[in-house]
Amino acid sequence: MDEVSTQGLDAEDVWDKLHEECGVFGIWGHPEAAQLTYYGLYALQHRGQESAGIASVDSITMHSHRGMGLVTEVFGQNQLPGLRGHAAVGHVRYSTAGGSHIANAQPLVFSFGKGNIALAHNGNLINARQIRDLLDRQGSIFQSTSDTEVVAHLIARGGYPSTVENVRASMTMIKGGYAFLILTDDQLIAMRDPLGLRPMALGMLGDAYVVASETCAFDTIGATFIRDVEPGEMLIIDADGLRTERFAQANRKALCTFEYIYFARPDSDIDGYNVHMVRKQLGRVLAREAPANADVVIGVPDSSISAAIGYAEELALPYEIGLIKNKYSGRTFIQPSQELRSLGVRLKLSAVRKIVAGKRVVMVDDSLVRGTTSMRLVQLLKDAGATEVHVRITSPPVRHSCFYGIDTSAREELIAARKSVDEICAFIGADSLAFLDESSMLSVFSEDGATKPDARSAHGFCNACFSGVYPTEIYTESPLSLTPKGV
């Protein structure tokens, strides 16, 4: 048994997946802006289940409502009618920076000398603490612990006459992975970080412009996808329409590969690649790289289903639904007593005994973080009668922490940072274990039938959690200046 005990873990701890920080949605030029934002956030609920919020603007006033919980819990019949206006931004959140508290729920809304402003942010600013320390020493008073509020203070302190100029100047001072939506009294501004670490797309619904973290939100409201927002690009949408400019040069691209592996919905397209097709091809490549003598292939719901189908097709093995997800065990359920901690995974997943009993099973999953979930699932399948369980992971071992908006454990808690593959296999109780090699993972983006014709190199993605090679500097000290670059 590993030196890390699972006895004291609650149900969320044993479900040790990585968590995306949040999803954003914005719309300009539609009389039902808030209602459509509600639907857009519902489509993006998988990106954050901790809090939700919407801010809207009419010709006179900015309105907002936010709360802890799922979109359907935060917004009822009494909230949406009060969010009047032709434009809105919305946010769903899972905290990685700032902690879980209503003060950190977004969009953050402020009033200052130049008017009203609402900010919604997906990602993480790696130098937010350093900037915040400087602003604190200069007299700024913060209302939350979210790194998003740092940007609001920078914009408010800007000395330029227009909000766009102040936003542009503020962006030169922050580092990290982000997709920002900023709503003012007369503009909607959208920005994607210079490396494209976090996704963002542009669409249209009639004459209205729509911006969202994923294209699945467009499909939900009937909008048409136009294009992805480019790294380092700023969209300015107002009464005169849409215009774009660069606030930073994009010398390379480093989109987080976990968007394809795990985070995004399979019906979304990100930077030209369909998520379902990528995952299916990951499964095919993994099958060629690490085949298993087995009778049946199953996937861990929901994000690994596409990969499991690809794995099964490549080896001409039957794919079956061997694990069933309890749709109602989500973010909040009564925690089991200490004596019943082992039920943590069983509350979320159950094995289909008739499918796995007496079978050699390949269980395909997208990632393995601390190993606790894999251990519980292997035991679950063996308790259901599986004679062998072979675990196949469609990503490389996660050995390093993320600083760009993904909630990874501290490095010492990442099992692959401490143990070999054989040791991990023994810990989780599998009959065999294999991860997808990093180069094999990247090959998916150039294979025929996987994605689109133009191939991408390793420089197109951020794989820091696998390799430890970060696309930006990682700040540990604070020798910063609040003077924008070029000023």
Image (cartoon, grey):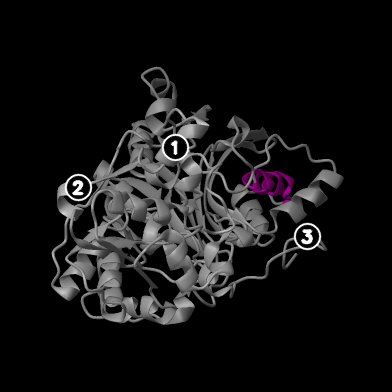
- Give left or right: position of 474 versus 377: right
User: Under tag 3, what secondary structure?
Assistant: loop
Q: Residue tagged by mark 2?
A: 353
Toward the top, the furthest residue is 78
First of labels 2, 3 by sequence position: 2
State the quadrant of the C terminus.
bottom right
Front in this rendered view, residue 70 or 190: 70
Left or right: 481 in relation to 324: right
- Along the line of sight, the residue nearer the viewer: 24 or 247: 24
Q: Nearer the viewer, residue 359 or 275?
A: 359
Residue 82 pos. (x, y %): 44, 21
Estimate the spatial distance between the alpha carbons at disc 2 and disc 3, rounded to whole Å. Answer: 63 Å
Query: Dot 3 corresponds to which residue?
Result: 483
Of residue 321 and residue 474, the one placed in the foreground of this image is 321
- Regarding mark 1 in the picture, which secondary structure is present there? strand
Instruction: Give the labeled residue for mark 1.
Output: 88
The image position of residue 436, as x and y in percent, is 38, 74
| Above or below, 211 relative to 473 | above
**Is 183 placed above or below 335 here?**
below
Mark identifier at residue 397: none
Which of pointers 2 and 1 indicates the residue nearer the eye? 2
Q: Is residue 25 left or right of residue 453?
A: right
* Residue 386 lies in the magenta-colored region: no
Residue at 72% x, 66% y: name it.
485
Image vertical order of residue 255 relative to residue 183, above or below:
below
Mark 2 vs mark 3, foreground winner is: 2
- The amino acid type found where label 3 is placed reads Thr
Separation of disc 1 and disc 3 at Cα? 31 Å
Q: Which residues are magenta?
A: 147-159
Q: Residues within 10 Å of mark 1 (few under 14, many from 20)?
A: many
